[in-house]
């Protein structure tokens, strides 16, 4: 695990704690800030995973059959 992934997880957990605190104290602002922190943490983790991931893991092993007919109108009509 790299540093960005850990920081993202910490931010996500801090957001969850803020959401719970906001619900306990009936403070809507804290709940919204907690949701923002949680989402930011998840996005930070996703960015860290894609930055350090293996390209084969992200894009497949070079089998690009799904992209061979991309943009063709006859494929859209089911004629291809």
Image (cartoon, helix red, strand yellow):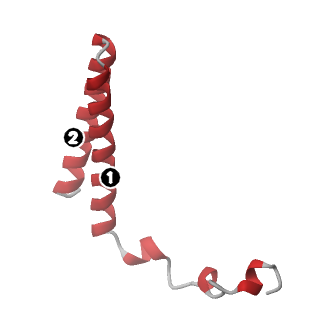
Q: Judging from the image, what secondary structure is the residue with disc 2 in? A: helix
The quadrant of the rendering that contains the C terminus is: bottom right
The quadrant of the rendering that contains the N terminus is: bottom left
Query: What residue is at 34 percent from the left and 17 percent from the top?
Result: 23
Task: Single out the residue that lies furthest toward the left.
Answer: 3
Looking at the image, which is closer to me, 74 or 19? 74
Expressed as whole percent of the image width and height from the top left, the position of residue 47 reads: 30, 60
Query: What residue is at 62 percent from the left and 80 percent from the top?
Result: 66
Expressed as whole percent of the image width and height from the top left, the position of residue 40 reads: 28, 46
Query: What residue is at 26 percent from the left and 24 percent from the top?
Result: 30
Looking at the image, which is closer to me, 15 or 62? 15
Task: Single out the residue that lies furthest toward the right.
Answer: 79
Badge nearest the viewer, 1 or 2: 1
- Decide: is 17 above or below 9: above
Q: Residues within 10 Å of mark 2 (few under 14, many from 20)?
A: some
Expressed as whole percent of the image width and height from the top left, the position of residue 5 reads: 24, 53
Disc assigned to residue 68: none
Q: Which residue, given by chain and number where applicable, does mark 2 sit on?
A: 10
Q: Quadrant of residue 14?
A: top left
Expressed as whole percent of the image width and height from the top left, the position of residue 74 reads: 77, 86
Q: Quadrant of residue 46?
A: bottom left
Mark 1 or mark 2: name the one nearer the start of the chain: 2
Q: Which residue, given by chain and number where applicable, does mark 1 sit on?
A: 43
Looking at the image, which is closer to me, 26 or 53? 26
Q: Residues within 10 Å of mark 1 (few under 14, many from 20)?
A: some
Q: CA distance from mark 1 to mark 2?
A: 12 Å
In the displayed structure, does residue 47 sit left or right of residue 61? left
Task: Give the total number of marks visible in the rendering.
Answer: 2
């Amino acid at each position: 695990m790299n540093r960005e992934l850990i920081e993202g997880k910490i931010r996500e957990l801090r957001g969850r704690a803020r959401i719970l605190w906001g619900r306990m104290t009936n403070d809507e602002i804290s709940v919204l800030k907690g949701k923002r922190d949680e989402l930011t943490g998840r996005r930070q983790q996703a960015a860290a995973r894609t930055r350090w991931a293996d390209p084969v893991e992200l894009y497949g092993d070079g089998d690009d059959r799904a992209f061979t007919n991309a943009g063709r109108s006859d494929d859209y009509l089911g004629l291809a």
